Amino acid sequence: MEQQTIEVGLGERSYPITIGAGIFRQIGEMLKTAGIAQRYGIISDDRVAALYGDLLSATLEKSRVRAELFTFPPGEESKCLQTVEELAGRLAVAGFDRASALIALGGGVVGDITGFLASVYMRGIPFVQIPTTLLAQVDSSVGGKTGVDLPQGKNLIGTFYQPRAVYIDTDVLQTLPKDEFLGGMAEVIKYGASMDADFFHWLRQQHDAIVALDPAVIVPMIRRCCEMKAAVVEQDEQESGLRRILNFGHTIGHAVEAVSGYELNHGFAVAIGMQAVAELAVRSGRASSAVAEEIGALLHLYGLPLEIPAQYDRVSLRRFMRTDKKASGGRLVFVLPVALGTVDITDQIDETALDAVLA
Ligand code: NAD
Ligand code: GLY
């Protein structure tokens, strides 16, 4: 299948996103043509490296692109400063210098770590993204948010640092565990519900082909998400306003995720968060009940949860949301759906309505 390219337009920091089924074997040639660096450090987790490390090394070797692989254990626990320090040390010992670049081969954890490392190693070297989860393909590999977690909270250390290119091969989704795919679908639905009603309806019509990973629908689906994310990032790279739209479902979703002790899949928590803000919009008189019903029905169609599990402590939930409140200058900011594909970003929330939704 032919590959498609879209551009993230950020002046001299603009970059292409190339999407296609089976493009992996062409990455060597594409990187060679891009001429980003003389030598590449491929950063991956052990699971993704076992699945795709050889394939990537083969395409790079074939195009005579010099690269070495560095891995760490999979999982959010690895997304910490210690991993960054260890990787930086290994790169230094291997002689990586300012003429080098990094390749992030993996999901959002690998992408966030690699982007952060690239932004600080030798005061900044280029990096490219090869996202291998649906979440990373539609969200985290695009837009330049990088970072790691602290024991005190997620993503508390980080930078805005754009990649030089993003290569998305949709074939890699075939090895992704089903829950990881469905969690990614929550982020896909997020784009439809908050920015594009036609796309939202298309996701319902194409359900069977999407879950069957038919490239004829998966490629345009990912492309549309990347287009929407690129358009937002182009207007508000460092989240001073509009970029908050990408947090639709995340204000309550993050608190739900935290209360679960990060056991609940991120996308599942976002699905619960989207349904909760849809209900909040209805209770606050800003949306019709049909909007909340349609969002809930699509999330349900993709096997995503809608309700905050009864056993999750509501006091802790409120506490986690208050922490969020401090981080956003004293008031909680909600992205409320007012119609399908249209949201209102507001800190004016009826506390009684919020209490009712959380209950
Ligand atoms: P992840 O990177 O941990 O990947 C999930 C699991 O899937 C891992 O075990 C990984 O080894 C495995 N995996 C990856 N690709 C695979 C494949 N093709 N086949 C089989 N297994 C595969 O998790 P994620 O959901 O991709 O990303 C979550 C992270 O992304 C979080 O840390 C979150 O904070 C971050 N994030 C960042 C942004 C951003 O804008 N930077 C946006 C959203 C989320
Ligand atoms: N995932 C939210 C953002 O990139 O802003």
Image (cartoon, rainbow, N blue to C red):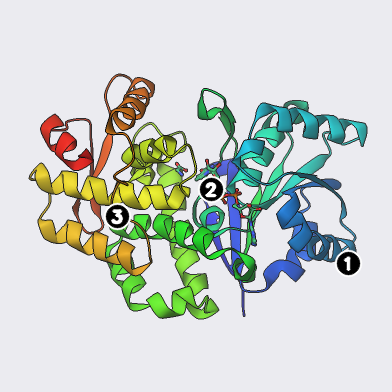
Q: Mark 3 highlights which residue?
A: 306
User: Mark 3 to mark 2: distance in Å?
Assistant: 23 Å
Q: Is residue 286 visible?
A: no
Q: Please say if 196 is above or below 262.
A: below
Q: Secondary structure at mark 1?
A: helix
Mark 1 lies on residue = 62
Residue position for label 2 = 140
Label 2 beta carbon less than 8 Å to ligand 1: yes
Above or below, 217 against 270 in this view is: below
> Taking the image as drawn, is residue 77 in sight?
yes
What amino acid is at disc 1?
Answer: Lys
Q: Residue at x 17, y 30 (%)?
A: 348
Badge 1 or badge 2: first in the primary sequence? 1
**Quadrant assignment, res 336:** top left
Expressed as whole percent of the image width and height from the top left, the position of residue 119 reads: 67, 32
Q: Nearer the viewer, residue 211 or 68?
A: 211
Q: Is mark 1 within 8 Å of ligand 1?
A: no
Callout in the foreground (3, 1): 3
Crowdedness near tag 1: few (<14), some (14–19) or many (≥20) residues, C-alpha within 10 Å: few
Which quadrant of the rendered structure holds the N terminus? bottom right
Q: Residue at x 49, y 44 (%)?
A: 263
Q: Residues within 10 Å of mark 2 (few under 14, many from 20)?
A: many
Which one is nearer the viewer's eye here, 51 or 221?
Answer: 51
Q: Are marks 1 and 2 in contact (CB under 8 Å)?
A: no
Residue kind at label 2, given as amino acid type: Ser
Q: Is residue 244 left or right of residue 26?
A: left
